[in-house]
Image (spheres, rainbow, N blue to C red):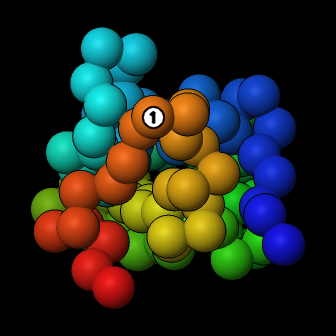
Amino acid sequence: MTATLTLRERVLARHALGLDGRRRRSYRNHYVVGSGDDHAAWLGMAERGLARRRQGSDLFGGDDCFWLTRAGAEAALNPGEDLDEEDFPR
């Protein structure tokens, strides 16, 4: 079964992957965020197994760091795009 992202989640996931419409391959997999709507969206993705969360630390100024699981990342791809295997080893 393919994971489904809301439009907002998809925008956030694509940003985390560095996919801006010009690149065809991801080059990163992280998103640092404090409280707010984006944080709530990331928590929702984490609850559904599409992302993982590292709770705030000094390294991130107290903000949380999220990264996508393979399922979450694949749901964000456009046709013809792929994931960098360094971030998503098989």
Is 42 displayed left or right of 65 in the figure?
A: right
Q: Is residue 58 visible?
A: no
Residue 47 in which image quadrant: bottom right
Residue ID at (81%, 52%)? 4
Quick one: 31 or 80, which is closer to the camera?
Answer: 80
Q: Name the residue under label 1.
A: 80
Residue 56 placement (x, y as % from top left):
38, 66
For this orientation, the residue located farthest to the top is 22
For this orientation, the residue located farthest to the bottom is 90
| Helix, strand or loop for disc 1 | loop
Q: Report the amino acid beneath label 1.
A: Gly
Residue ID at (64%, 36%)? 10
Quick one: 52 or 78, which is closer to the camera?
Answer: 78
Residue 24 placement (x, y as % from top left):
31, 31
Number of callouts: 1
Q: Can residue 79 be seen in this view?
A: yes
Mark 1 surroundings within 10 Å by alpha-carbon count, few (fewer than 14), some (14 through 19), many (20 or more):
few
Position of residue 81 relative to residue 89, above or below, is above
Residue 89 placement (x, y as % from top left):
27, 80
Position of residue 87 relative to residue 18, above or below, is below
For this orientation, the residue located farthest to the front is 80
Is 40 displayed left or right of 73 in the figure?
A: right
Residue 13 placement (x, y as % from top left):
52, 42
Residue ID at (77%, 28%)? 7
Residue ID at (78%, 63%)? 2
**Quadrant of the image containing the N terminus:** bottom right
**Quadrant of the image containing the C terminus:** bottom left
Is 35 displayed left or right of 81 in the figure?
A: right
